[in-house]
Image (spheres, helix red, strand yellow):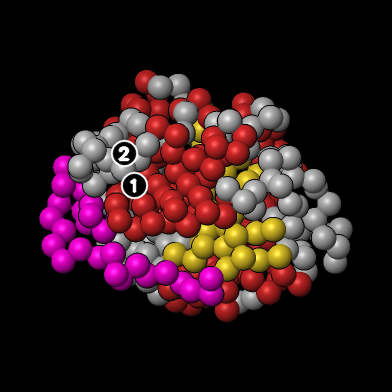
Amino acid sequence: MDAPTIQPKFLSKRDELGLVAVGFSGGQCKPGVDAAPMALIESGLVDQLKDDLKYKIHYDGQVHAYNELMPKDDPDHRNMKKPKAVSAVTQQISKQVYEHAKEGRFVLTLGGDHSIAIGTISGTAKAVHERLGRDIAVIWVDAHADINTPETSDSGNIHGMPVAFLTGLASDKPDAPFGWLAENQKLSLKKLVYIGLRDVDRGEKKILRDHGIKAFSMHDVDRHGIGKVMDMALGWIGSDTPIHLSFDIDALDPMWAPSTGTAVRGGLTLREGDFIAECVHQTGSLVALDLVEVNPSLEEQGAAETVRAGVSIVRCALGDTLL
Ligand SMILES: NC(=[NH2+])NCCC[C@H](N)C(=O)O
Ligand SMILES: [Mn+2]
Ligand SMILES: [Mn+2]
């Protein structure tokens, strides 16, 4: 197979990829998502990116568990569970992603639960601000909006809050857990687009409405078809903005991806998920990708299938083509 043919617009080299493997599950309560990076790598993801898609991969060879960063004592803060752990880990991820992104490399992060996007997106945003003087856009593909503030969240799980912190809808005092997020690490609400939503909390619906946030729910996918939805989503972002794609595997229907912590029926087909990734690749604007929430220890009979779905989405986003 040939190397990707799309010339990336916002990367300095078309074939350089920084990989960050994050074995972290502290943004929610179910153990097992930390095992996803190894499962994805063992199923051949990295070899395929190297051998089939011809990427030159910069990888430190480690699935980071960040044990050295775990606080001894981590009481709830504003209703958030494990605030210090998530803060320390996401701050470290932010640096790791930034180090790759500032070199003009594509950055692939394998999670881990979705709280890690506080790190990945802040790292991309900072590097893109510095390198190109631009804001990034984020396409958030998920059954959930993950835009709860600590105050609107029922669960207290931080994987339901990353977008609130990244957009500044939620913030912490400088000395509090998420006080480290600086202005140049944040995301504009106008540059955020959701696809696949179907389980949005009441407080989150109000946030989406009040701020006019662009969101394509499963209803929109049913009504228009995924082709039209992608045209509208990419049209909203425009062709001159670097894109960070944050893909929660639970956007897919549990038929295709059962092994995930907060599965919701009525989701995207595997092909619709791949199609989203293909369309985003074809823009030439993609600069970073997260793949999160694969949990091989849940619905174990479906774990291999879930991992395969994850591999497929990453391949499509990185330029794999059928023909
Ligand atoms: N990244 C995810 N899977 N998030 C699920 C969030 C579920 C729920 N809205 C919450 O705040 O807890
Ligand atoms: Mn989700
Ligand atoms: Mn999510």
Quadrant of the image occupied by residue 165:
top left
Residue at 44% x, 38% y is: 185
Left or right of 26, for residue 189: right
Tell which of 136 and 277 is nearer to you: 136
Secondary structure under the numbered disc 2 in the rendered image: loop
Secondary structure under the numbered disc 1 in the rendered image: helix
Label 2 CB, ligand 1: below 8 Å?
A: yes
Q: Quadrant of the C terminus?
A: bottom right
Q: Is residue 72 magenta?
A: yes
Q: Which numbered disc covers residue 152?
A: none
Q: Which residues are magenta?
A: 60-86
Whichever of labels 1 and 2 marks the residue nearer the N terminus, that label is 2
Percent position (x, y) of residue 44?
64, 75
- 309 up-or-down from 102: above or below: below
Residue at 71% x, 65% y is: 56
Q: Which numbered disc covers residue 148?
A: 2
Few, some or many residues within 10 Å of mark 2 (<14, 14–19, 20+): many
Residue at 58% x, 50% y is: 101
Percent position (x, y) of residue 41?
57, 74
Label 1 CB, ligand 1: below 8 Å?
A: yes
**Residue 258 visible in the current orientation:** no
